[in-house]
Amino acid sequence: MNRPYIIIVSEVTIDGKLTLYRGASSKELMSLMTEEVYKYLHSIRAQVDAIMVGCETVRTDDPSLTVRYVEGKNPIRVIPCSTANVPLNANIFSKDAPTIIVTTKRAPQERIEKIKALGAEVILAGEDLVDFDLLLPMLYERGIRKFMVEGGSSINWELARKGFIDEIRIIHLPVLVGGENVPTLIGGEGFKSLKKVLRLKIVNYFTIDNFLITEWKVQK
C-alpha cells in the first residue's frame, strides 16, 4: 500500500493515562507541560504534511492543530468522523490551515454540505466506519507523505491493529492518575496474544525540563 509514514505523538502519564478521567479533556494534563515541551511537540507538527485527531478529541478538547510555538507551516488537519457529527463551531474549521473531514456513506448529506460550507474538504472512506485501508492511499495521492496522529486511543488502536504505525513519540507527564476506565495510549479490544503485539525499538530518549521524551520505531 502506498501510504503516508505515520508517527503517533502523545502526552501520557507515568501510568499510561491520556486524561484525568473518561470524558475529560486532555488539555487539563497538558497544562502541566512547559513552553519548551510545547516547542518539542509543535516542532513535530511543523515537520509533517498532515495531522490527525478523532472527532471525539475535537468534541472534548477543541484543538486548533496548528504550529504556534516554533516557526513552520501548519499541517493539513485530517479528522475521521464516521457520521460527520463534528461540531461546526470547532477550532479545526479556522482558516489557519486546510481541513479534511473523513466520513462514510452513512453520514447525512445535509451534514456534509454544512461542513463543505465552512471551507473544509469532505472525503468518503468506508460504509459505516472510516476505513483506513481506503483513506491512507487517498491521502498519499494528495501528496501527504508524513503524517502525525495526536489521538485518541481508538484511532491509535485502529492504526496499530492494521500495522500502519511507523513511529511513536511519547511525552511522559511526571504524574500518576489511576482509574481502571481512564483512556490509555492504545484503546480498542487489544491484541490479546503475545504473538500479535506490536513490538517497538527505542531510538532516542532525553529530558526537557522534568519531562522524559521517548521515541520509538515499530519493528516491521
Image: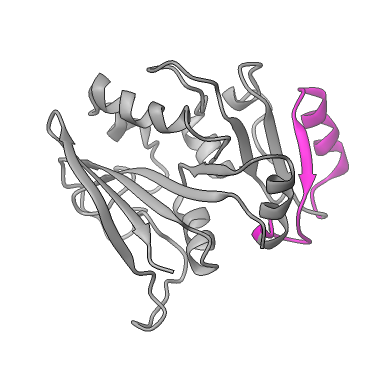
* Rendered location of residue 152, percent (x, y): 47, 48
Residue 125 counted in the magenta span: yes
- In the image: residue 199, left or right of residue 202: right
Residue 202 visible within the image? yes
On-image quarter of the C terminus: bottom left
Residue at 65%, 37% in the rendered image? 86
Tell me if I can see residue 21 in this picture.
no
Position of the N terminus, as image quadrant, is bottom right
Q: Is 107 a magenta residue?
A: yes
Q: Who's the residue at 47% across and 65% down the image?
A: 188
Quarter-of-image position of residue 27: top left
Quarter assignment of residue 34: top left
142 over 34 or under it: above or below: below
Up/down of 66 relative to 25, above or below: above
Is residue 64 found left or right of 1 in the rendered image? left
Q: Which residue is rendered at x = 70% and y = 39% of the image?
A: 101
